[in-house]
Image (cartoon, helix red, strand yellow):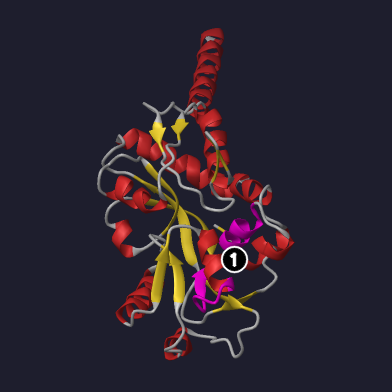
Amino acid sequence: MAVNRLERVGLQVLLLGLSMLAGAWAQPCSRAVRVPVAPTGFNVRVLGDRVEGVYPDLLRQIGRAQDCQFVFPVVPRARLSMMFFESLEADIFLPASRNTERDQKALFVPMLKLSPTLITLTAKADTPQDVRALLGRSTWRAAMVRSYSWGDEYEALMRQLESEKRVDYVTDLRTVGAMLRGGRVDFTILPPTLLYSALQEGRSDTDAGGDFRFTELQGLPRSEVGAYISRRSLSEADQQLLREALSKAARDGSLLRALQRYYPPEVLHHDAVLN
């Protein structure tokens, strides 16, 4: 009887161990996960038919660990939001900033916080320090990348500037830098990492970005940035798998290491806060 009891205990321990081991082996995604991308500085780089950058690199790492395949169709930036929120041609929208309207349509996974910052030429004198002062500069025009959003407060500011016809929307970050340097506009509002990466790619010595001033703008809080996961195109099991994998990547240092491969410490220090 004692032997049988020991055998039963041993069998229970073995089964428990196997159960825990099976739980550690995550189930694979049920199908390839569609993540349309557009060039976004170092966050997403499109080099011919190759897609790389902070977030494609991170997703490929997750894919190897979770046995998931991610595909990255390259599309114009303005189409990304439509493909995810409207036509259901996308399963993940990444990187994406959080706002109330988007939260109503998809599942958000917070991964880091970025600082939307007032960016002007260093030659600009008496730079506004808050949103009210910026709105008071009625002659100042802005260049903004179409479809970018940095939270509800940013959206409210854009609506006010649009009502005063003080915004020029463009399709990419390098155009923003060119318009600022050319004197066609007076400011933009972006996390410093984005403009930094756009100006570094293929830069000449005069493109280094040292002629820009970065000013924290009171009234614009840090923007939550992460991934939106589709509730409509993905199964509940896939949603849960991807949510847990992305959250873990933000916690365990995977995202930080991906950022550090592309951005110098001083840029990350002034902009990004990991969740």
- What is the x, y in percent for residue 196? 62, 61
| Residue that lies at the very extreme toward the right in this rendered image | 205
Q: Quadrant of the C terminus?
A: bottom right
Q: Secondary structure at mark 1?
A: helix
Q: Is residue 197 above or below residue 190?
A: above
Q: Is residue 135 above or below residue 111?
A: below
- What is the x, y in percent for residue 52? 57, 40
Quadrant of res 101: bottom left
- What is the x, y in percent for residue 151? 40, 67
Q: Amino acid at mark 1?
A: Pro
What residue do we see at 40% from left, 33% from top? 33
Residue 169 lies left or right of residue 104; in this view the side is right
- What is the x, y in percent for residue 110? 46, 55
Region of the chain picked out in magenta, as a range: 181-201
**Residue identifier under label 1:** 192
Q: Is residue 56 above or below residue 171?
A: above
What residue do we see at 46% from left, 47% from top? 38
Quadrant of res 264: bottom right
